[in-house]
Amino acid sequence: MLNDKKLILIVDDEEDIREILSETLKSLNFEYLTACDGDEAITLLDQCHDTIDAVICDLKMPKVSGDQVIAHGAQHYPLIPIIILTGFAQLDMALDHIRLGAFDYMTKPFRVKELLLLLNRALEYRQLQEDKIAYQNTLEKRIEEATQALHNRVVQTVSSFILAIEEKDRYTQGHSKRVAEYSGLMAKALNLPEEERLDLLYAAQLHDIGKIGISEHLLNKPGKLNKIEYETIKTHPSKGVKILEPLDFLGHLLPIIEAHHERFDGKGYPKGLAEDNIPFLARIIAVCDTFDAMTSGRSYRKALPLKIAIQELKDGAGSQFDPQVVDAFLNVFEETLELKMLSQGAP
Ligand SMILES: [Fe+2]
């Protein structure tokens, strides 16, 4: 026996049967509760389901019958095994009830040995189910912990790379952080699912990582770049991909990072992708990136006033930028950004 103090609910409308079962269970060192009909059984199940270990249930009872008790138990307390107590005449019905969720059946008159065997089997089965659930919960917890650990690793890696970019290019200090901030607002405005929101945030922070591979002199050069210099700067999206390629847990971000200078009309770089061929998250970063580049100072020019930057985005909708993304950005700007930026002293 698994435990000599298991609590069994006896459900039968015949007082004699309830008494015999009670006495038998008592002699076998079980505890018991009794219900004289289905209605009382359901009430007891609802009140004591945390402590009831198994149910022995008659089928034919006045008012609420055994099948309703079985249906209620199977639906609300599937871990509690229900053993049907039935006469030979109702054997077919008993088998139907097993299909509906009862654990097994026992025919009247029952033998003590048979009752004990059946109860132990039911309780063992319940224990197995509980162990299975506990194991699944442990597994889910471990997966959750592993996901969190991976998330932390991404955050640490991204933070370290940002420090490296900003160390090199003093004019872009805070740029990655701001582009990520705008991207976060866009994710909310566009109602992106959580996974995509995180991808967007990481890619936004890492989009210029390839600048690590461009000379400091070129990145900080005051004045206009010549053609060769500009072509060199244009290699930074592909360089970013090369730098991050060995980190397979960031692999899904590479197409986004590579495409952040693509244009909606196909005239961008490095691949000249257009419209839907540009990853959607890269189209979002393109708008946030350009907006921040315009509204913060560079080695070759001062920050543009907000009004002009917004007009540039509007003018670029459909050519440089995805118009749907520009629309979303304009809403974000009006609702959140404008006031914040003006209060921070933006021109
Ligand atoms: Fe860039």
Image (cartoon, grey):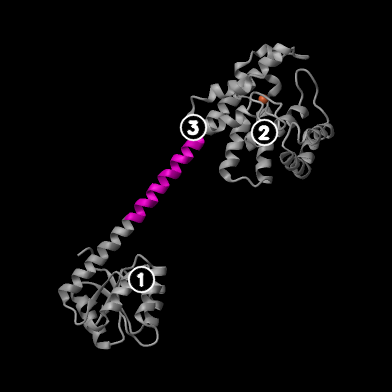
- Quadrant of residue 315 within the rendered picture: top right
The one nearer the camera, 196 or 227, is 227
Look at the image and tell me whether residue 219 can be seen.
Answer: no
Q: Which residue is mark 1?
A: 100
> How far separated are the C-alphas under marks 1 and 3?
46 Å
Q: Secondary structure at mark 2?
A: helix
In the figure, 128 relative to 259: above or below?
below
- Quadrant of residue 80 within the rendered picture: bottom left
Asked if residue 110 lies left or right of residue 234, the reply is: left
Q: Is residue 15 magenta?
A: no
Q: Split into 4 quadrants, where in the image is the N terminus?
A: bottom left
Q: Is residue 140 magenta?
A: yes
The one nearer the camera, 252 or 345, is 252
Name the amino acid type tagged 2.
Answer: Ile
Name the amino acid type tagged 3.
Answer: Phe
Count the marks: how many? 3
> How far separated are the C-alphas under marks 2 and 3?
20 Å
Asked if residue 269 lies left or right of residue 91, the reply is: right
Q: Earlier in the sequence, mark 2 or mark 1?
A: 1
Q: Which mark is residue 38?
A: none
Image spot of residue 274 (x, y percent): 68, 32
| Magenta segment, prevailing SS (helix, strand or loop) | helix
Mark 3, other Cα within 10 Å: few <14 / some 14–19 / many ≥20: few
Q: Which residue is mark 3?
A: 249
State which mark lies toward you, 1 or 3: 1
Q: Secondary structure at mark 1?
A: loop
Name the amino acid type tagged 1.
Answer: Leu
In the figure, 75 relative to 225: above or below?
below
Q: Residue at coordinates 61% horizontally, 37% vertically from top-left?
A: 200
Q: Earlier in the sequence, mark 2 or mark 3?
A: 3
Image spot of residue 70 (x, y percent): 36, 74
